[in-house]
Image: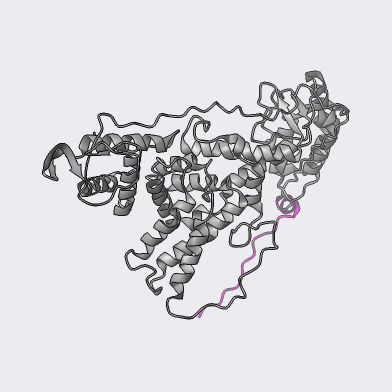
Amino acid sequence: MEPRLVGPGPYRATRLWNETIELFREGMPLRRHRSLFKNYECCFKASEAVDWLHELLRCNQNFGPEVTRNQTIQLLKKFLKNHVVEDIKGRWGKEDFEDDNHLYRFPPSSPLKPYPTRPPYRKEVIKFPDWNVPEAGTSQEHIPVKPLMMNSEMWFKRHSIAIGEVPACRLVHRQELTQANIEEIWKSMTLSHLQKVLGLDSLDEVLDTKLVNPKHIIHNVYNVNKQGIVILEDKTRPSCSDLKQPTYIGFERDVFKTIADYYGQMKEPLLTFHLFDVFVSVLGLLQKNKKAIEALQVSCLLLPPENRKKLQLLMKMMARISLNKDLPPLCDTAGTRTLMVQAFSHCILCSRDEVDLDELLAAKLVTFLMDNCQEILNVPSSLQRVIEEHVVHLRRVQIKYADADTDTTLPAPSFCRQISTDEFECQRANGSQEPLAALLEEITMNKEISVKEKKKKLKQFQKSYPEVYKERFPTPESEAVLFPEKNKQKPQLLMWALKKPFQPFQRTRSFRM
């Protein structure tokens, strides 16, 4: 059985737990061992199990090479507690597994975790008035219509466009959105976007959406400082900016221990228990870096503002310490980066159920967060823009065209009213006479265009609007006034030459040299 990538989806941690047990039972080498002058068949040493399982986890893309030997030992302790393994005398139930030569074996069957069942959560959809039912107290009869104003340039570009059928339309008068409506819109659109990024048919199996507070989402989006850190409403907490920095040797370790103890005393992780399955599902997207970052951006918006602020400050500190090469070693047995992950993984992500692979999953998630914290902990601007535009769209008076969706995301034209076909024909015949007459007059009096160009435009206008043209030029004579004909006269030089008397040829004197 080869390890496979477990993608996003419901009960991902449970699936990983069960798959790891199956891989361990199937692949762990078993042989005869001797202990206290007695031979035992089909068993293994504790150190052998640590070696084999550690290599399995490091090569498994669900966990990765960051898995430490100590984390492997912690997992084997959970295996012993949950009767995945037992000692050679059949004892189990305690977490006393150590990296030594004690002998262990598999029971006849290792218990797999059952998949829990959760009742489906029914989403409440905000209902807006139907477009066929106008809002009480409103009338569609007295709606101002902007007159059509065209100059010669506009008309020249549009004169050849045929006027087609205008679809019937009706104004939609939206109900005023309350604060509760806006909060529900933010919640539903944020969860819908998260579901799309995770590639799931539903979030019901990974998240109880009733526990998602829309006020937290809105607060995390708008109440931030210039650095993107959440601003809490409670500003009575004391500031530490005036405290003097210690200077004694080794103070860095003491400060780090104080911070680690502070976060270690929390009763609930920063990513909260009810969002555990969501963040574990995001781990299935780490092969697609951009998708994972986008999913984490949206998921972190669901956190309470206090948790989000603590997470932002902690991750920034961890990233800076890991990249600070001038910082003295904070631990003698582990590197700075490994120490950061080991010290804070459990306070960032863990589950209520201790048999889960929460330590391995948390270490993988925290490593990714630390490497991409600047981008992940920012507000996703594209999601914010889409939701804000949707709210503005719902507040605006809309136009509903027949056989069209009222709640389309593209705002419909909002400056017209529904009229009958006969009324439209009447408006086209009479309502546009004045601007068309003004346009014809502008063409007529325009002295900047040539006579040829003017005749061309007048001919086009006459073809498109013969009634308006005939009213301006009722007779050919009135049209001819624009282009007076010039009297063609015969050349005067020839006539003058013929009237002169004949002059005889006169010899001129020449001078010869």
- The percent position of residue 247, horizontal first and vertical second, equals 49, 80
Q: State left or right for residue 149 relative to residue 359.
A: right
Residue at position x 80%, y 35% from top? 436
Q: State left or right for residue 60 relative to residue 254.
A: left
- The percent position of residue 342, horizontal first and vertical second, equals 39, 57
- Give the residues in magenta: 494-513
How was the colour assigned to the protein in this rendering?
one colour
Q: How many marks?
A: 0
- The percent position of residue 410, horizontal first and vertical second, equals 65, 36
Residue at position x 45%, y 53% from top? 369
Q: Is residue 296 above or below residue 84?
A: below
Of residues 33 and 374, the one nearer the viewer is: 33
Q: Is residue 274 above or below residue 112?
A: below
Q: State left or right for residue 459 relative to residue 138.
A: left
Residue 397 at least partly seen: yes
Q: Is residue 243 above or below residue 113?
A: below
Q: State left or right for residue 80 relative to residue 380.
A: left
Quadrant the N terminus occupies: top left
Q: Quarter-wise, where is residue 465 in the image?
A: top right
Q: Residue furthest front?
A: 37
Of residues 258 and 59, the one nearer the viewer is: 258
Q: Is residue 508 magenta?
A: yes
- The percent position of residue 274, horizontal first and vertical second, equals 53, 40
Q: Is residue 40 magenta?
A: no
Magenta span: predominant SS is loop
Residue 2 at least partly seen: no
